[in-house]
Image: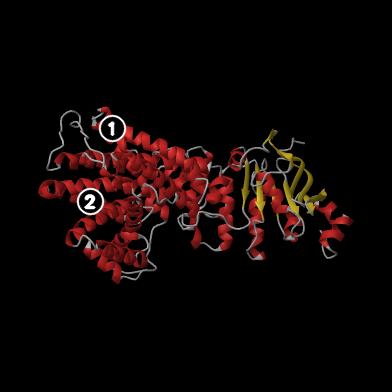
Amino acid sequence: MKSMSASGGAATPSGAATPSTWRGLAMGRSGGDLAIATLLGLGALATLLFGEAYWLLASQVAITMIFALSVDLLVGYAGIVTLGHAVFFGLGAYTVGIASAHLGWTEPLSGLLLAGLVAAALGGATGVLVLRTKGLGQLMLTMAFASLVYEIANRAKPLTGGADGLQGMVIAPILGLFEFDIFGLTAFLYTLAVLGVVVGLAVLMTRSPYGRSLVGIRENRVRMQAIGTNVQQRLLSIYVVSAALAGIAGALLAQTSQFVGLNVLHFSLSGEILIIVALGGAGRLWGALLGAVVFTLFKDRLSALDPAYWYFWLGLLLAVIVLFAPKGLIGLVDRLLSILQRGEVR
Amino acid sequence: MLPPILETHGLNKSFGALTVAQNINFSLEPGTFEALIGPNGAGKSTFVNLLTGLIPPTSGSVILDGQDVTALPIEARVKRGMVRTFQINTLFNSLTVAENVILALDEHHNHGWRPLPSPTLRRVIREEAYGILDRLGLAPWGNREVKSLPYGRQRLVEIAIALALRPKVLLLDEPAAGIPSTETGTIIEVLESLASDLAILIIEHDMDLVFRFAQRITVLVQGAVLARGTPDEIANNETVKSVYLGEGIHA
């Protein structure tokens, strides 16, 4: 990761031969995608075999990746902006938390499904309103809904535990077989498996006519309507899908940590996930996934070194990326690969 | 004569005290290449916007293929065969030429909701897209990003997207706008060669083109139809001459 950042700083920021937006994302044949997928796969394998100290961290990474992917589908592909996506993440977390602590619903897989459905329902209800606006209006509305739900969760102490967090969650063994262990192996494999399914479906979706139509809407909404697309419906559908995925990510966090705190609904989480997508490269699935890994590891390392000031380094990293690699880390990887392959800097 | 594919009955549009469309009764028959002309501010674009559903009329109705579509949104009218191009290129700029057409084909064939890819389907659609590009001489540029094409060629992509939707009515808003007059002939020739069961309404400022190619001409002045007829009739219409064409124009 270090070498990539370094080369990005040195290489000329402009004029890189980049594939068309669509070829990059719909065909998925860009070298960067493959390289990152390989890298992440190897990373996961190495962590599994040699990194037992990092299993818990790795499951956090996997959860963040799912969350980032949900936001990238919305922001990067469909061009909808949001600064309130934590509302769906948090709702998913509270759904499995409350179902477990208050209703005794401890089965994890059906819990995920339930969380996805509840988040999707909220996505549908708020999406209708959010999508009436564009740009700044969208930003404000998504923030507004997230704040509302945050305060509701804060006040509904009997249900959520308020600021103390939700205690007393129990999660049953996965499929009745695999109990969550203190080393986090089950949590790691569980989140990895869910991540695999989600990424697989998302990759297929982005290469489908549906996925391409979202890019079309982002590129030119007026024209999409002029070729017969009901733009509003199409956008609402991805809003709901994205909300469901974010809800599943939140549910995973609640299940693997067997605790839910108010921070899962906090504004700063909505901001962080947007940073992650921008860092990795918006509009590219593998960019968002890489961004989630880099960000989470960065945060873990830097906050261990200096818990108070790690945001300084995050800010610096983000500024460098935005200024010198506007296509994000995946843009850097693409460029690096084209340099390696053709031995030229264009 | 075939029944009209597109009609308007008493179409009116006012913004407060400003009337931009006045009792427009219009009809377009299949296989017709008709031009809509008029001085700047005559309400030509407003008329097209009323037809496509971008703005609702104050009163009156739009009939497409025998059905009243006045209350339908833009995309529903497109689905029923009324397709437009834009005066200023309105394309998917960072996609390739072929991808622009493929998007339109996907929507036309109602694949837009398919959440899973299908290589077979994609191949079929791709071939269809290249068939359309071929007709417009765009096939060699299929893999180029739209924004890297010269403006004139981008104008043809506008038309390619429209053709992908298999229109019954094609509304062309100044298809030759912004390109050198030496090249405008190419575009009109392409349009002329289009299917004979297609009805085309073209807004165009270049009177040479209009009088050379249009079968019928509608003259719009201050939101109202001033005259309608063949190019000869229009060229010899005294009112049209005095109000709009001036003395220099002869067919």
Residue B247 lies left or right of residue B201; in this view the side is right
In which image quadrant can residue B66 be found?
A: top right
Q: Residue A193, percent across and down?
A: 23, 39
Query: Numbered disc 1: what chain?
Result: A
Q: Residue, x 24% and y 46% (percent of image)?
A: A62
Q: Residue B173, percent across and down?
A: 66, 53
Disc 1 marks a residue whose amino acid type is: Gly
Q: Residue B148, percent across and down?
A: 49, 62
In space, the residues marked 2 and 1 are separated at their CA atoms by: 27 Å
Q: Single out the mark in the foreground, 2 or 1.
A: 1
Q: Residue A291, percent across and down?
A: 29, 55
The image's mark for residue A111 is 1
| Coloration of the structure image | secondary structure
Q: Residue, x 41% and y 42% (percent of image)?
A: A208
For label 1, the SS is helix
Is residue B240 visible in the rendered image? The answer is: yes
In which image quadrant can residue A182 be found?
A: top left
Could you classify mark 1 by the number of other residues whose Cα lies within 10 Å: few (under 14), some (14-19), or many (20 or more)? Answer: many
Is residue A267 or residue A156 the one in the foreground?
A156
Q: In which quadrant of the rendered image does the C terminus of chain A lie?
A: bottom left
Could you classify mark 2 by the number of other residues whose Cα lies within 10 Å: few (under 14), some (14-19), or many (20 or more)? Answer: some
Query: Numbered disc 2: what chain?
Result: A
Residue under label 2, please give it.
Answer: A40
Mark found first going from the N terminus, 2 or 1: 2
In the displayed structure, A218 sits above or below B184; it is above
Labels in figure, total: 2
Is residue A6 or residue A183 the one in the foreground?
A183
